[in-house]
Image (cartoon, helix red, strand yellow):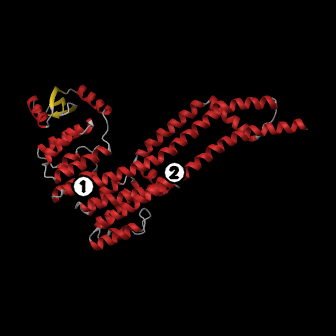
Amino acid sequence: MPRFGYTALDLDNKPVYGTIDAANRSVVLEMIKKQQLRPVELHEASTQSAGLLKFGKLLKPKVHSKDIVIFTRELSTMVSAGVPILRALTTLQAQTDNSTFKTILGDVVKDVQSGANLGDAFAKHPAAFSDTYVNMVRASEAAGILDDILKRLATQQEKNDSIRKKVKGAMTYPTVLIVMTVGAFFVLMLFVMPKIGKIVKDLSGPDASLPPLTQAMLNISDFLQQRWYVVLGGAAITVFALRRWIKTPTGKITFHEFILRAPIIGPLAKKVAVARFARTFAAMMGAGVNMLEALEVTGRATGNQAYERELTKAAEAVQNGRQLSETLTGNWYFPAIVPQMLAIGEETGQTDKVLVKVADFYEEEVDAAIDSLSSIIEPVMILVMGSMVGLIAASVMGPISDLAKNIKG
């Protein structure tokens, strides 16, 4: 079946780009008009134009979590008000300002028009809709509670987005300090230390024996001046190799384990993962997803391979007849409060409500940990920068002090 590329205008006269597989041009035009779009250009996509289209996608804006949150909240409101799902999707597609998301919603509208379930239509676009999102929508469609689950999804997306922004914001300041520290080190070694070294050698004489600290600093400075490309090249190769290794299954889980057990940032990463687990698992159980599937999807939603591995083990234990609370008891990755609250939820049949409270608690813990992290990292980085300047000052003052003693003698 041939593929057609098209350019069209939406209700706000904004351009929309996409491709459609259809038997002929008439079918394509009809499908475009059903999306309430006005076709401007239509052509059969060749291999070359398909390649250009893929390149063009790289230049398009990404679908941000904010776009998904707004879409989910508005879709929930419209469905609750009795608006047909197809009409709601078409309206939201016309309203969105993100051209990439507009194209995705156009594809979702086409799939729903063709008779596909909403969850299956979302599943074709993993860049916008996560596994958790898709599975909850599928479960809600089967149970007939789409509007309620969409509200849960919107709340969950907002909470996850809030945690992500807080963690990102907390790491911004330390990152800036680290970059400044490294930059200051290279400036001092490449530009300041050579001039100071020349002055020291002129004062001490060419045959004078310099203190070990001074000589070490001068050697580092000389090496960076003469072999700076080796340092930069080695750093670039190391970063590239590390990034490639982290993308491998072994590297990814090793890196995630290291993050969880690292001092200072480890407790924060652990609290973030537990908060995501509690909120996502609660939302999926509330949507009627069976426990084994909920554990599998929740493991991926935590964003940590170590937690995904532990939840996979827990799912196997549950499948063999054990309670989830019993499985997680004594597990280092889950604080004692998690299995205890799970046990209460299993006894009362309110696992989702209980875990929401756990999620709220750990999200508050994340806020406190982020504030604490910021207060710890700032003095540490100031100490590092001060120590670096102090070393250079000491390396300069040593030979000057020796020279003064010789003059007095």
Left or right of 29? Residue 192 is right
Inter-mark Cα distance, 2 to 1: 33 Å
Which amino acid type is marked by label 1? Answer: Lys
The quadrant of the picture occupied by the C terminus is: top right
Left or right of 250? Residue 125 is left
Residue, x 79% and y 28% (percent of image)? 202
Looking at marks 2 and 1 on the same chain, the residue that comes earlier in the sequence is marked by 1
Q: 158 or 240: which is nearer to us? A: 158
Q: Badge 2: how crowded within 10 Å, few (<14), some, or many (20+)?
A: some
Q: Where residue 380 appears, x then y in whole percent? A: 59, 49
> Residue 374 bears which disc, if any?
2
Quadrant position of residue 9: top left
Q: 169 or 136: which is nearer to us? A: 169
Query: At numbered mark 2, what does the secondary structure look like: helix, strand or loop?
Result: helix
Q: Is residue 356 above or below residue 164?
A: below
Return the residue at label 1: 151
